[in-house]
Image (spheres, rainbow, N blue to C red):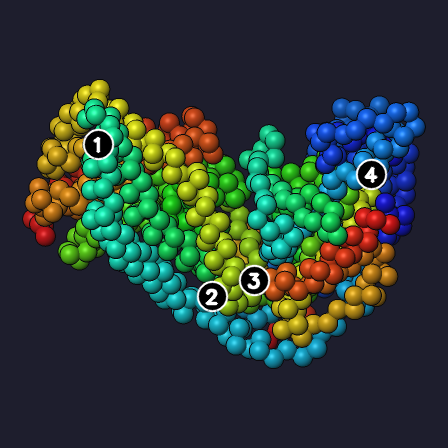
Amino acid sequence: MAASTKPLAISLYNMKTGEKGIVAYFKTKDEAIIKKLMAMGVIPGLPIALEQRFPSFIIKVGRTRAALDQNIAKAIYVRLTASK
Amino acid sequence: MNMLINRVRYPEQIEKAVKEIEKLLTVDYKLSKRSVALLLLQNDEALLEEIRKKEPNSQKIFEVIEETQKHFSEPLSFVIATARQEAAFKVEQETLKEKGSEKLTITEFLHKLTVNPLTGIPIMVLVLYFGIYKFVGVFGAGTLVDLIETFFENNVNPVVNQVTAQVIPWKFLQDLIANDYGIITLGIRYAVAIVLPVVTTFFLMFSILEDSGYLPRLSLLVDRAFKAIGLSGRAVIPMVLGFGCDTMATMVTRTLETNRERIIATLLLALAIPCSAQLGVILGLLSNNPGALLVWVGFMLLVFLLVGFLTAQILPGKRAAFYMEIPPLRIPKLKNILTKTYVRMKWYFIEILPLFILASVLIWIGKLTGLFDLIVRGLEPIMLWLGLPKEAAQVFIFGFFRRDYGAAGMFDLYQKGILVGKQLVVAAVTLTLFIPCIAQFSMMLKERGLKVTLAITAFILPFAFLMGYLLNLLLTALGVNF
Amino acid sequence: MDCHNCNRSCHHAGQGHRRRFGFFWQKAQKERCEERLLKIALVGSPNVGKSMLFNALTGAYVTVSNYPGTTVEVSRGKTIIHGREYEVIDTPGMYSLLPITEEEKVSRDLLLEEKPDLVIHVVDAKNLGRMLPLTYQLIEAGLPVLLAINMMDEAEQLGLEIDREKLEKELGIPVVTMAAAQHQGIRELKERINEYVNK
């Protein structure tokens, strides 16, 4: 997936608690995960915030809160906008 | 029928591709052609398969899809979903207005408490302790059961026995309805005196947990730990349900995503999760002896983790992914809780009760034909091997038909002084591990199929006895007796 | 209207009927056919209160059965609006017309096979933007859609307000707001259903 001249995106897994950004793209060979995430509203262009990392990742996408595991966190790439 | 179908305009290349594919479609898929074209571009497997089989121009259609993909660096399903989502957000922006937010702060605070591991885990332990042990175990399985059972013993059974003796002349037929193992005196009594109060209190508690929004938070707390045994946080729901009724929990395993998860969950439910009826009696049995109770809990936990871990290593397959929406915490509405509990109880009585009546009948036939005694005799040497009295054999056979029959039978032996000291713990552990009750067994057949069910049963049977043996050995070696 | 398509869904089937001859016979048949049992399908993601709405509409007359060939359960019930009977089908959770889970597959198959006369897309008010894509997909597919925005009470708590009329104009389909758990908006929903079906 080409990350052209836009600012760098980092994976959710590497974000720090409290950081915010916009969902950029997904990096995984597992299309089922992509479909699942999209079906639940995690789509590029949506604002995303990382609320917690342990024991599971907790994110807020738009107005919805969700929990996910490490594997999925590694697959979501975010362009940071602001941090707490 | 809607006239304005072009509601969302997709990127130029996609719209072009859609028009081309629409022209090539000949079969009616019960969807609009535009929709079919879009789904094909989004890589819908089922539809792709259909056009492969039915469309004369399928090859051309595939070419269009391939060509279109070349224009985009991301997958087409992506591009299309994004365009649609953007349109949706635009509409939302124009029609949904957000004012200030006030009482959010309390809910937010509570939420943070439940998910932060420092506070969340103690909360989880408290919830499970009060919810399962105190409410279901002590109140439901203890207080309520005693109440109703005494009523039966004093008021119902004697009457039934008398009436049956008068109406039916043959003893063996009397035994079918009344006396020790009759349909009414045992089957129905157990259903109303033990099952009803315990399962009701359990379902009540579960409905409260469900409606309050707490369950997803429980899931996210245990997901990591569950991954070690091949499950995801999602599995916490059938697991917790299993403490209420393993049969219902086995049915709920179908909500787990991968087959691997479903098998592991089913195995653990059959092996290590005592249902509320059984739990109630075992807690009653061991509560006099907190040391024994601790050993039982500890041992069961160990078996649960060990077997889960090993099975996860052995079974091939993809790991289960965990993604769950966390709804806001809310105060459950009484009406909803009562409705949910009622519906689940109804299901229980309609689905499970007949099986237990069948169990009464089978035991009756077994006793009549002497088959029962034969099996009991065969089991006796194994009991001795475990350091248990030979009377315990009957308890285990009963255990298949009703897990609580078994546990209650043990309770009788305990009261008669036949089962003492460390024998109690060994018997409790072995019985809990023992094969699932007839209702759960039939649900396993229905959900997992014959092969998997037989494999699980074939494993559990010797394993349960082996664990009993090992525990007995361990306790004897350590000189522990209670 | 194709009369010979009546068969099962015609709720007059099985009842004794007086034979009329010729033209009058055909007219009587046609009248009876126009009163066949209409189907409403409830569609939407889990956690939007779909089942609550289903209960509010159907009350106690519910049958739960497996969708043929699957282990997925589908609930069916009946509701009466202005004296007319409708069959209501509660589909398993659906996020998108592109199915991921078996439940979504069943939901889609159900929509296509059963040809409901009305598809009510139930969504959660506070997540409107997230759920509209499915509304669009349903409309794109050519299905008859009505948007039911549920959980308005929660949205209100969060300080959210929805301009229902504007939304209706934007989407071009009927939009109803409600809070099924509180039994609010159910009457309006029934009115709109009646309107839609009899236009």
Badge 1 marks a residue whose secondary structure is helix
Amino acid on which disc 2 is placed: Val
The chain carrying label 1 is B
In this view, the mark in front (1 or 4):
1
Question: Which residue is pictured at 71% across the width and 45% down the height?
Answer: C85
Disc on res. B327: 3
CA gap between label 3 and label 1 equals 60 Å
Q: Which numbered tag is attached to residue B115?
A: 2
For disc 1, the marked residue is B166
The chain letter for the residue carrying disc 3 is B
| Left or right of residue B286: residue B477 | left
Mark 1 to mark 4 CA distance (whole Å): 62 Å
> Element type at marker 4?
helix
* Closest to the observer, B371 or A15: B371
Q: Earlier in the sequence, mark 2 or mark 1?
A: 2
Are discs 1 and 4 both within one chain? Answer: no
Report which residue position mark 4 lands on: C34
Same chain check for tags 2 and 1: yes
